[in-house]
Image (tube, rainbow, N blue to C red):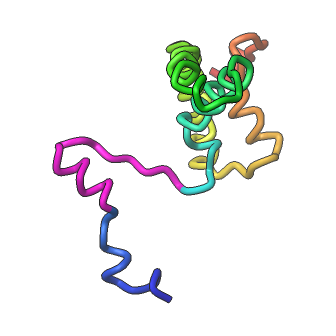
Amino acid sequence: MLATQLDFLQQRGGLEEELEAAHQLVIFYPKFHCELNFIERFWCASKWYARENCEYSLKGLPETLPAALDSVSTAAINHYCYHCRRVIEAYAEGKDYGTKLFTEHVYKGHRQVVDKSKW
């Protein structure tokens, strides 16, 4: 009920207000759509590294965490961003998730035969 109130809908969150006051651009992705947010893929890769290289103790966490964040290359981050952009484009073009058209759009690779007659 509260979520439908106009003043509640118009109120920005505290984090958003603080960042905007510091002249930072704030972009919020839809909730629960990790396929649209490349940061989720970054966290996933970082967590994988941390799990593979941790001591499973609070003492070892301060050493493992920075290394886990550094383990994800810039090239990988760019790849995650590109993939998420392809998913957003597929949705924007009206393609339905799970269909052949959606999959072909999102997972279009550089190693494929291209029909140049369609250019």
| Residue 107 image position (x, y, % from top left) | 73, 28
Q: Which of 4 and 95 is in front in this view?
A: 4
- Residue 51 occupies quadrant: top right
Q: Does residue 27 sit above or below 118 in this rendering?
A: below
Q: Looking at this rendering, what residue extends furthest in the bottom direction?
A: 1
Q: Which of 14 and 9 is in front in this view?
A: 14
- Residue 42 occupies quadrant: top right
Which residue is at a point 24% across and 41% down the rendered structure image? 24
Q: Range of the magenta residues? A: 14-30
| Residue 87 image position (x, y, % from top left) | 63, 39
Q: Which of 116 and 78 is in front in this view?
A: 78
The reply to whether residue 82 is in sight is: no
The reply to whether residue 20 is in sight is: yes
Residue 53 shown left or right of residue 19 in the figure? right
Q: Is residue 119 magenta?
A: no
Which residue is at a point 71% across and 28% down the rendered structure image? 56
Q: Does residue 39 sit above or below 5 in this rendering?
A: above
Which residue is at a point 73% across and 52% down the rendered structure image? 96
Q: In which quarter of the image is the C terminus?
A: top right
Q: Does the magenta stretch include residue 29?
A: yes
